[in-house]
Amino acid sequence: MAAYRWKCFDENEDRPEKPRSYGVTEMRSPHYTLLSQNVLQDIFESVGQFVDGLKFAGGSHSLMPKSFIKEVTDVAHKHDIYVSTGDWAENLLRKGPSAFKEYVEECKSLGFDTIELNVGSLGIPEETLLRFVRLIKSGGLKVKPQFAVQINKSDIPIGDRAFGAFLIDIMTIVSVCTEFVEDVDLLIRRAERCLEAGADMIMIDADDVCKQADSMRADIIAKIIGRLGVEKTMFEASNPRASEWFVKQYGPRVNLFVDHSQVMDLECLRGRSLGKNHTSVLGSSYFLF
């Protein structure tokens, strides 16, 4: 068996060993791909040193036996990996305030470390959101509000060129956008208040922005990071090219949420100077059997 040695970070790259407060890689699982405990164990044993967090995306934990969830969280903790609920808390609002408190207590008993709050789906007044943040913190868990950045259709120029750089089908962009106009300044102000109330980090769902990395709205991302700080924000990288863009723009300190299949690729991106083709980093990083 031949194997290539994993790269090591230079001192000037400024990314510590786990547990990390920045340069965090959060992994999606299970949701889009159903992972058994054994598969998770294999992933953690092979690339666990590069994974900081595990997220049960899409409320998938609500469909699983509690015993299985506890087994998964225990395995994650053995590898110094925190576990996040993903965005599910909003589904409890119809049951009243008491249900939310019970949810926090149950999450703690099952071994979750972080509760994520999808602000857009919650649809609650800002003061109520801040009260939820404080309630989660008082329960001994971390809290990560999630905000979505959406592109207004009016931002898309008429013609063949989108965002002045990347030739793209305008109708394709329009189909994935919504009529809702996201005020980035308002998003940042609400996120700042969440941090002041005790939130540990802000998750930014910039799917509309990141669908095509070549047409990335760098001004929006820069504004968010400039106000909130790179260490207090985490971005969902919807594809490997988006991961490459973030790392090249903001270095290995940027916090990213990726699919489990992208963990090794992302770690290579964090640890070396990249060329234009992100796939070039894979050849020297995978183990060869």
Image (cartoon, helix red, strand yellow):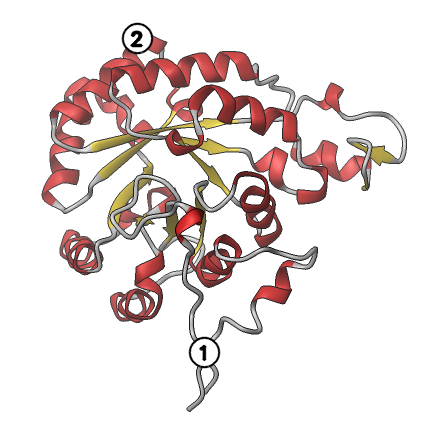
Q: Quadrant of residue 94?
A: top left
**Quarter of the image containing the N terminus?**
bottom left
Q: Position of residue 72 (x, y in %)?
A: 21, 58
Kind of residue indicated by mark 1 = Phe
Dot 1, crowdedness within 10 Å: few (<14), some or many (≥20)?
A: few
Q: Secondary structure at mark 1?
A: loop
User: Can residue 191 be seen from the camera position used here?
Assistant: yes
Question: Horizontally, is 89 left or right of 5 in the view?
Answer: left
Most foreground residue, 286 or 103: 286
Q: Is residue 180 above or below residue 62?
A: above
Dot 2, crowdedness within 10 Å: few (<14), some or many (≥20)?
A: few
Question: Horizontally, is 173 left or right of 250 in the view?
Answer: right
Question: Horizontally, is 268 left or right of 56 in the view?
Answer: right
Mark 2 vs 1, N-terminal side: 2
Q: Position of residue 17 (x, y in %)?
A: 29, 52
Q: Is residue 183 above or below residue 74?
A: above
The residue labelled by disc 2 is 127
**Residue visible at 55% across and 33% down in the picture:** 206
In the image, which disc is placed on residue 76?
A: none
Question: Disc 2 versus disc 1: distance between alpha carbons?
Answer: 50 Å
Query: Can you name the residue that lies furthest to the right here?
Result: 159
Q: Position of residue 251 (x, y in %)?
A: 51, 43
> Mark 2 or mark 1: which is in front?
1
**Residue visible at 17% across and 33% down in the picture:** 141
**Residue visible at 26% across and 68% down in the picture:** 41
